[in-house]
Amino acid sequence: MSHGRSLLVAWLLAAPVPLAVQATLDGHEGRRGARGLRGVQRGLGHHAVPRRGTPAVTTLASLSPGTPTMSRSRAACALFLSSAVLALPAASLLAQDAPKPAPALVKRFDKLPLTVSLPGEWQMAEASDSSDPQIQQRWRGKLGETELVADLFVLPHREFAVDEPTGLIDIIGKYRADPKQGGNVAFHFDEVTHVQGKFGVASYACVSSSVEPGKDGEARVLRLAGLLEDGGYVLELRCAPPPAAADTKALRDALVKAVESGATPREPKWTDAEVKERWKSSVPDELADKLEDVLRTNHYLILTNSSGGKAFAKKMEDCYAAIRKVFPFDEVPGRRLMPVFIFRTNDQFYAFLGKQLGWSAEQAKHSRLAVRLPESEGRFMAALAESMMRSSLGGSSLISTKWRSAVLIIPPPSSTGCSTARRRRARGRRRIARSPLR
């Protein structure tokens, strides 16, 4: 107890009705302190008179019948004070006994650059029981009765040339549904959605959920896919047995927060330098310096060495809106504009197609990729837009993992005064295809 005046009111746990009042008078307190002590003495009676400089302690149990005691109000005040005094150490003990949350497991991959932070309650530890060269790191853990396995896949661009995180999920979906690769044709994703954040060069990541067979039975598999400078990555979380819906949602929410990348975000609308590089790397050498017009719409990047690009761009957006009414899907901020090449002649298209596939122009001319346009331009535009929208929806018509841009061939304009029949024949010679991934 400190020097000077002090009054400690406490419950003495060993005594019945254990109320005690202790007052200590220091020799230097003077009249004022003595007066305060006499007030306490009056409330307790003559049995509570201490000697000067010594503590006075009494309990209600020690008072004989008839002994004057404190008034009810003073007793209630003492009781309140004693409860407050005891509450402080009790709260401190509870705080000390409460288990601290386990720290997150944080792993930094400087070369990617990528940081993975797995929640402490997953009890994750690094594992080395995988021989898959695409797995950068594996962790094993447990949450309740659910066994957890987390794998970080890194997919280099030279092998998996995709431009969007959705393309990575497309690849996984096709692999899981291919019986030749051990898949099942009935495979499907229960959910495919997108989240915004610092996930790499793309400002969004693609998240999927599915139930898949495993060595020890079925497992709920959650995946988060993103893009890096030199490829893509997928953080896969396998949960066996499949947890309840509420637990699955909690695991999914934690997975979304588990990845952060320091990669420089790209420009979704393409920079001018990127546009020129894309044109030069895609077209035949003789057309490398023939880019005449570049048009950016809400969803497409039109590259052409011909006229008519503006009208074509408007039709593309009209078809996009029409298809979205039939197949509602979310707009994804951060998704890049889709390149569309418009060439002046068929021969230019065949040369372009040959360069993409490593074929001669003659081989390209007779390939199935040189599809003849329908007579109705409206039907053609609807078909083209539908194929593009299916890509956005994760569909399989002109698949986004195999095709990266639309290519339209526009023959030279007919001479003034040419017949309607000649114009129709010219329209019939127009062809469309999509350029494959490089």
Image: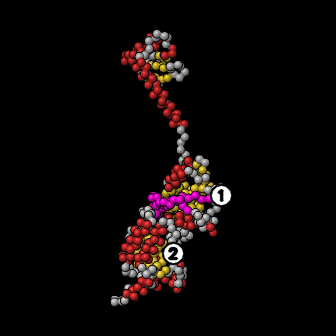
The three-letter amino acid code for the residue at tag 1 is Lys
x and y, in percent, of residue 91 in the image: 49, 33
Residue at (53, 78) in percent of width and height: 357
Residue 172 has which mark? none
Which quadrant holds residue 310?
A: bottom left
Range of residues picked out in magenta: 188-215
Image height of 80 relative to 218, above or below: above
Number of callouts: 2
x and y, in percent, of residue 155 in the image: 55, 65
Q: Is residue 193 visible?
A: yes
Q: What SS does tag 1 mark?
A: loop
Count residues near mark 1 (Cα–Cα under 10 Å), then give few for <14, some for 14-19, many for 20+: few
Q: Which residue is mark 1?
A: 215
The three-letter amino acid code for the residue at tag 2 is Pro
Q: Is residue 30 visible?
A: no
Image height of 257 relative to 70, above or below: below
